Image: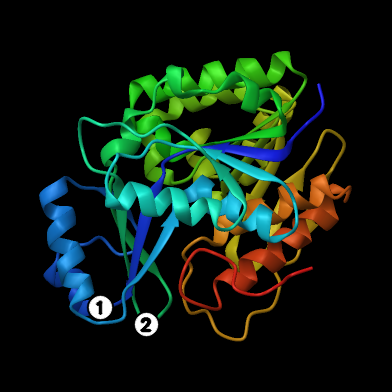
């Protein structure tokens, strides 16, 4: 079957609401610096109001895997996204926000239930981001939302670990992976967050062992997945599953391990870290786009480094200038 997309992503469709804050703001609003907390709708509305009072708030259609698809499109490759929104104002702006940057998004919205998802991202002066996320409609993702024809039309299926917080979504991931594998496509997974790994370790291991061809994670996440404090041990475990590993290590760059060897990939230089939001998402975008362009793993990894360096040099999780 002829492919229509280089990569299709599945994950939470979330409106990112981003604002610079002081360290005191985090304490006042009981936010755990550097973490990602799931919140209910009343707290989301309260934090939204507090962040907006500063006057520098940005609203960007996002979600972790969605940001990766936007990055892939910005690099000139073909991307699509599947995620759940509500039939409300935020949902409409999310759909428009993806399609405006050439990411094919056509998931049918829900007409009953919670509002569309949003993530409050507070960025402190050191560039660290603290996220409080109301999952809303995005958590209503089920196997029925997996579009077989679209999965089959993509060279790579990219799955977002954050979506694992709902049991029906886990089943949807397995369903999508099975469709991709039956069509001879590759399946990639991002672990998303070490807290997420802690909540779903066994499910992630099952997915990696049986369905995943390419795993994206940072060092803390991969160590948590295999409950070890040694990176070599974690990578050896991945070798047994024949899964390609793309492991980010902040300023140390990344390690990519394919079936033959491990590549040490340098980080790209950055004059000033402004906001780390989306660094891992754009690294994955660079790697996957690089592979779609025909690059080897090490060169694709460095394209990922360039994409990560670009996005942390400004506010927001989307690229703002051309990389290639």
Residue beneath the point at 63% across and 80% down:
270
Mark 2 crowdedness (10 Å alpha carbons): few <14, some 14-19, many ≥20: few
Residue beneath the point at 64% across and 37% down:
233
The disc placed on residue 23 is 1
Upstream in sequence: badge 2 or badge 1: 1
Query: In 3D space, how far apart are the residues under numbered discs 2 and 1 (Cα atoms)?
Result: 8 Å
- Report the number of numbered marks: 2
Residue 241's spot in the image, x, y percent? 69, 23
Residue beneath the point at 52% across and 45% down:
65
Q: Are marks 2 and 1 in contact (CB under 8 Å)?
A: yes
The disc placed on residue 286 is none
> The C terminus is located in which quarter?
bottom right
Q: Is residue 216 above or below residue 46?
A: above
Q: Is residue 190 left or right of residue 304?
A: left
Out of 155 and 86, give the one closest to the viewer.
86
Residue 170's spot in the image, x, y percent? 43, 22
Mark 1 crowdedness (10 Å alpha carbons): few <14, some 14-19, many ≥20: some
Q: Is residue 184 left or right of residue 272?
A: right
Out of 246 and 159, give the one closest to the viewer.
159
Badge 1 marks a residue whose secondary structure is helix
The reply to whether residue 111 is in sight is yes
Out of 166 and 244, give the one closest to the viewer.
166
Badge 2 marks a residue whose secondary structure is loop
Residue placed under numbered mark 2 in the picture: 125
Residue beneath the point at 15% across and 57% down:
45
């Amino acid at each position: 079957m002829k492919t229509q997309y280089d990569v299709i992503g599945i994950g939470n469709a979330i409106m990112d609401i981003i604002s610079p804050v002081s360290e005191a703001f985090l304490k006042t609003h009981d936010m755990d610096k550097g973490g990602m907390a799931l919140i209910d709708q009343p707290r989301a509305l309260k934090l939204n109001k507090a962040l907006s009072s500063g006057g520098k708030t940005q609203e960007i259609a996002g979600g972790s895997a969605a940001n990766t698809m936007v990055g892939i499109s910005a690099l000139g490759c073909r991307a699509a996204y599947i995620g759940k929104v509500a039939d409300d104002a935020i949902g409409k702006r999310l759909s428009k926000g993806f399609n405006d940057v050439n990411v094919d998004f056509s998931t049918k919205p829900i007409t009953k239930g919670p509002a569309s998802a949003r993530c409050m991202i507070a960025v402190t002066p050191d560039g660290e981001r603290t996220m409080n996320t109301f999952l809303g409609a995005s958590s209503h993702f089920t196997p029925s939302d997996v579009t077989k024809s679209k999965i089959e039309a993509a060279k790579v299926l990219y799955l977002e670990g954050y979506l694992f917080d709902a049991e029906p979504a886990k089943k949807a991931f397995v369903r999508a992976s099975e469709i991709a594998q039956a069509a001879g496509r590759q399946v990639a997974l991002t672990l998303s967050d070490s807290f997420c790994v802690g909540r779903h370790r066994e499910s992630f291991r099952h997915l990696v062992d049986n369905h995943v061809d390419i795993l994206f994670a940072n060092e803390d996440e991969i160590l948590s997945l295999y409950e070890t404090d040694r990176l070599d041990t974690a990578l050896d475990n991945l070798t047994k599953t024949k899964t390609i590993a793309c492991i980010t290590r902040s300023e140390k760059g990344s390690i990519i391990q394919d079936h033959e060897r491990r590549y040490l990939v340098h980080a790209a230089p950055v004059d000033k870290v402004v906001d780390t939001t989306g660094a891992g998402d754009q690294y994955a975008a660079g790697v996957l786009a690089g592979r779609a362009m025909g690059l080897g793993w090490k060169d694709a990894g460095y394209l990922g480094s360039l994409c990560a360096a670009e996005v942390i040099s400004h506010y927001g999780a989307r690229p703002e200038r051309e990389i290639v």
